[in-house]
Image (spheres, rainbow, N blue to C red):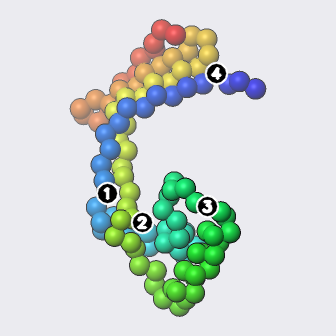
C-alpha cells in the first residue's frame, strides 16, 4: 500500500555536552550501556555471533561494576527550523521556526 507521504526537515545540529551525554548514558538500561561497548553504531560487522560473543565478554568484564561511558560516545541535538510535509495529491504544508520560537505554517503547491 503506497501512502504517498514525504517529509523534508532542515535543522541545525549541535553536539551535546559531555555532562548531558553521561546523564543520558546512565539513564539507559544496562544492556544498552553494554551494547555501546560492544559495537560502534552503523559499523560493518562480520557476524551476529561475534557481536553476541563480545556482548558476553563485556557482561563478564563489568559484572557487578558500573559501566563507564567511552570517550567517543555522545549525542547530538537536532533543532528543526523548517519542516515540509507532503501527502499525495495537493496537500503540502510548510512549517518555519521564527526567531521568536513560534512556528508559522503555509500551504504549498504540489
Provide residue 45's location: percent of width, then percent of height. Answer: 58, 60
1 or 4: tag closer to the N-terminus = 4
Q: Nearer the viewer, mark 3 or mark 2?
A: 3
* Secondary-structure class at tag 3: loop
3 or 1: tag closer to the N-terminus = 1
Question: What separation in Å lies between label 2 and label 4 (alpha carbons)?
Answer: 36 Å
Q: What residue lies at 40% left-to-right and 73% top-to-bottom?
A: 69
Question: What separation in Å lies between label 3 and label 2 (alpha carbons)?
Answer: 29 Å
Q: Nearer the viewer, mark 4 or mark 3?
A: 3
Question: What separation in Å lies between label 4 and label 3 (alpha carbons)?
Answer: 36 Å
The residue identified by callout 3 is 46
Q: What residue lies at 49% left-to-right and 68% top-to-bottom?
A: 36
2 or 4: tag closer to the N-terminus = 4
Question: What separation in Å lies between label 1 and label 2 (alpha carbons)?
Answer: 10 Å
4 or 3: tag closer to the N-terminus = 4
Marking on residue 4: 4
The residue identified by callout 2 is 24
Question: What separation in Å lies between label 1 and label 4 (alpha carbons)?
Answer: 35 Å
Q: Label 1 neighbourhood size at 10 Å, few (<14), some (14-19), many (20+)?
A: few
Tell me if residue 52 comes above or below residue 89 in the rendering.
Answer: below
1 or 2: tag closer to the N-terminus = 1
The residue identified by callout 1 is 16
Q: Label 4 neighbourhood size at 10 Å, few (<14), some (14-19), many (20+)?
A: few
Q: What residue lies at 30% left-to-right and 49% top-to-bottom?
A: 14
3 or 2: tag closer to the N-terminus = 2
The reply to whether dot 1 and dot 4 touch (C-beta < 8 Å) is no
Question: What separation in Å lies between label 3 and label 1 (alpha carbons)?
Answer: 31 Å
Q: Residue 58 vs residue 52: left or right?
A: left
Amino acid at each position: 500500500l503506497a501512502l504517498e507521504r514525504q517529509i523534508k526537515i532542515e535543522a541545525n545540529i549541535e553536539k551535546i555536552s559531555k555532562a548531558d551525554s553521561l546523564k543520558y548514558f546512565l539513564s539507559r538500561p544496562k544492556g544498552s550501556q553494554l551494547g555501546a561497548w560492544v559495537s560502534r553504531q552503523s559499523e560493518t560487522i562480520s557476524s551476529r555471533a561475534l557481536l553476541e560473543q563480545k556482548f558476553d565478554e563485556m557482561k563478564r568484564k563489568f559484572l557487578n561494576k558500573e559501566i563507564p561511558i567511552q570517550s567517543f560516545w555522545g549525542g547530538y541535538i537536532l533543532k528543526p527550523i523548517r519542516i515540509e510535509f507532503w501527502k499525495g495529491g495537493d496537500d503540502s504544508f510548510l512549517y518555519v521556526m521564527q526567531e521568536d520560537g513560534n512556528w508559522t505554517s503555509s500551504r504549498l503547491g504540489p
